[in-house]
Image (tube, rainbow, N blue to C red):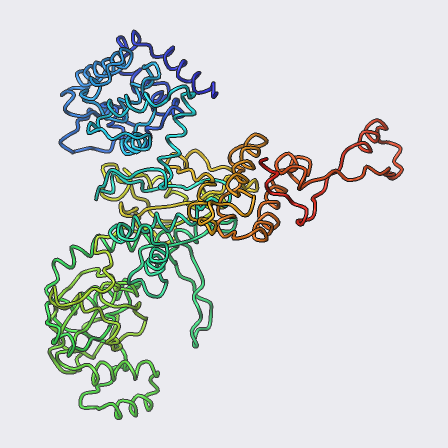
Amino acid sequence: MNTKLYDTKTEFLQKWSVEKLKTMTIEEYTNLNKTSFCYWVEAITTDLGSIWGGSAYKFGIYKRQGTKPDNRTAYLTDNEYSWVKKYGESRILAFENVRSLIISVAQNAIDNNLKAIDDIDLGDAYKWKIAFLYGDFNIIPIYKYEALVNSAVYLGYSGKDKSYSALNDFIISQKEDKEFFEFYRELWNAYSNPDDAVEVLQTEDNDDEELNQILFGPPGTGKTFHTINEAIKIADPEFYKLYANDRDKLKERFKLLLINPKEENNGQIAFTTFHQSFSYEDFVEGIKPVKPEEDDKYLKYEVQEGIFKKVCRLAKDSLNSKEIQSQNPISMSMDEFTKAQFYKMSLGNTQLEEDIEIYEFCIKNNCITIGFGDQIDFTGKDERQINELGREEKLSDDAIRSLNYFKNYLKVGNYVLISNGNYYVRAIGKVTGDYEYKESPFEINPTYNHFRSVEWLMVNQEIPIKDLYYSLLTQKTIYKLKREQIKPEFFVKEGTVSDDLKLPKNPKNFVLIADEINRGNVSSIFGELITLIEKDKRAGKDEELSVILPYSKEEFKVPHNVFIIGTMNTADRSIEALDTALRRRFSFKEMPPKPELISAVGELKDFDGIIGDVDVVRVLETINKRIEKLIDKDHKIGHSYFLNVKNLNDLRVAFRDKVIPLLEEYFFGDYGKIGLVLGNSFIRKTNNEEIDFASFENYDDSIVSDLKERAVYEMKQPSEWNFSSIYS
């Protein structure tokens, strides 16, 4: 029995009795000194069920830490306190009403009148946490509604009344003689594992989904395996509904939705593994060397985005794409699209401030221009003549090629996509005029003498290239886009383009999988972004926050359609536990061993998990019970090591290569303790022959004598192992 949990509840009641509530001041209710009623309910009693997350408005009224104005109509502030407007026009009135509601919750919990609590106008998680603290264990400390429903269904609930009170009444009635917090833990485990929990609520709103979650458990319990299911469930929920039980199709879809560094077209899922050398520069952004070009005389560096920043960029693009597409004036027929030619073109260097005027001039004057050619007029020159003249004037091959594309290859009626870096298009135009040589209008850029007139169809946009093209753009000033790489759905009238893959439509959800998340220095890897990943701190949310990134100096926010899934091996003693700052920003889903899966889905499913006279399910169950007694539940053996076992030889190999090495690590090579887990059939005591230690006068003779008598154990040969003896 966990006495600490009972003690925490007792301490709370001693500090905040109902009589104390009646005289509680606003300063006692909410302050910045970590002594308030609110702090007790949310932080000090966290082990009695968490209500972390969301904004401080869940308390009804709270003392402010900053002075940022809040102009939302549902809330009021006097700059010292902020409160929900419905509770009163002044802080005194609001506090008195909130205090009255809290007293009502507490008294009804004491009287076991749970139905009355349903109707009390306080946030659900907050009021039911208060109800648990004052009740006589008549409420289960599960405050998330989805978890409460799943817990009830797990226990067999089929009633129509899905209120908090009805669900709590049913759940408590099923406790029987189980210790209260052991029963509570069992329910959380059931909710945390999709094989046990029943999904009874469906929502399209990310506010009701876990944005940040960590799957944790001993080795071999399927944590990484389950990340595929979780990722597909988030990124492509419609596909998951159809093929939730078809592993091959889920894996195929997972591969399709993985973000490709070169082709970002379908990617919604990124996968990375944390390790000791993984850094902020890999995760967010860093200064990295650029692959040298032929003419480079020195090494160049650039700010490159890390995997998390990239996922956030793609997620933001997906949100923006919906609006861009709705405003897209381009509407071709499929026949028109088939005949159209598309070119990529740059209007100046987007990284240089002095080149901004080039783009702005072209947009304002309905034209395009390039700066090659050393102010030479190429009017009337065909491809051969430009090649000859270019070589005479010692122009570079790139300059000659670009001039030919601009003057001779690009035709009236062709389309030009104006790039913004390699990832975006900022304007789309249709060529309306032939080549013209003019005096450069740019004082700083005098070589921009070559012009073509265009009709601009879209300007000043940030269209993700993946919405138009299957590959990234390159740094070349101008080139023709490949026909097969262009996405017709951006240009063609709706309904005329087939979608064989039936991929999710914008806005889409994006997933970052961080395998072995506790192997890296998480605080260093996330840096200042640890706050931004909270649900209410995401872009567009009530408590939205942003930071200025250290290298690029860009403002950065985390979109609300980015999900993080981490995995954590609880048995790895080479790493430190996650710090509190990270823990409270993630929900944790335990992945315990499930021996029953050996007979349900493993290779032995047709034999009920039995090989001859060996019940493999009972073998694993027995081993894990003994390990939990000798160490703890975090060091159990996972079921995945046994899923591919078909015969006795496979079982021996699994023990030799997987199970026994883990036990050796767990028990630091102490074969005596391993013997307590596996028994006489696996471990034997060696002959206690007389051993002469080296002569060493300064060592205690009594200790030497004890060491000579110490038993030494060894592993038997695999051919001697009797697996059924483990449990019989």
Q: Is residue 296 left or right of residue 145?
A: right
Q: Is residue 312 left or right of residue 677?
A: left
State the residue at coordinates (16%, 21%): 87
Q: Quadrant of residue 372?
A: bottom left
Q: Using the image as rendered, state which of residue 716 and residue 225 is in the foreground.
A: 716
Q: Is residue 277 left or right of residue 683?
A: left
Vertical arrangement, residue 34 with respect to residue 448, above or below: above
Vertical arrangement, residue 627 with respect to residue 662, above or below: above
Vertical arrangement, residue 3 with respect to residue 722, above or below: above
State the residue at coordinates (58%, 51%): 648
Q: Position of residue 677 (x, y in %)?
A: 61, 36
Give the farthest residue toward the front: 612
Quadrant (top left, top right, bottom left, bottom right) of the C terminus: top right
The count of marks equals 0
Q: Position of residue 508 (x, y in %)?
A: 24, 52
Q: Position of residue 270 (x, y in %)?
A: 37, 54
Q: Is residue 36 left or right of residue 459?
A: right
Q: Using the image as rendered, state which of residue 698 and residue 661 is in the foreground.
A: 661
Q: Quadrant of residue 382?
A: bottom left
State the residue at coordinates (11%, 78%): 432
Q: Using the image as rendered, state which of residue 611 and residue 277 is in the foreground.
A: 611
State the residue at coordinates (45%, 63%): 289
Q: Position of residue 442 (x, y in %)?
A: 21, 71
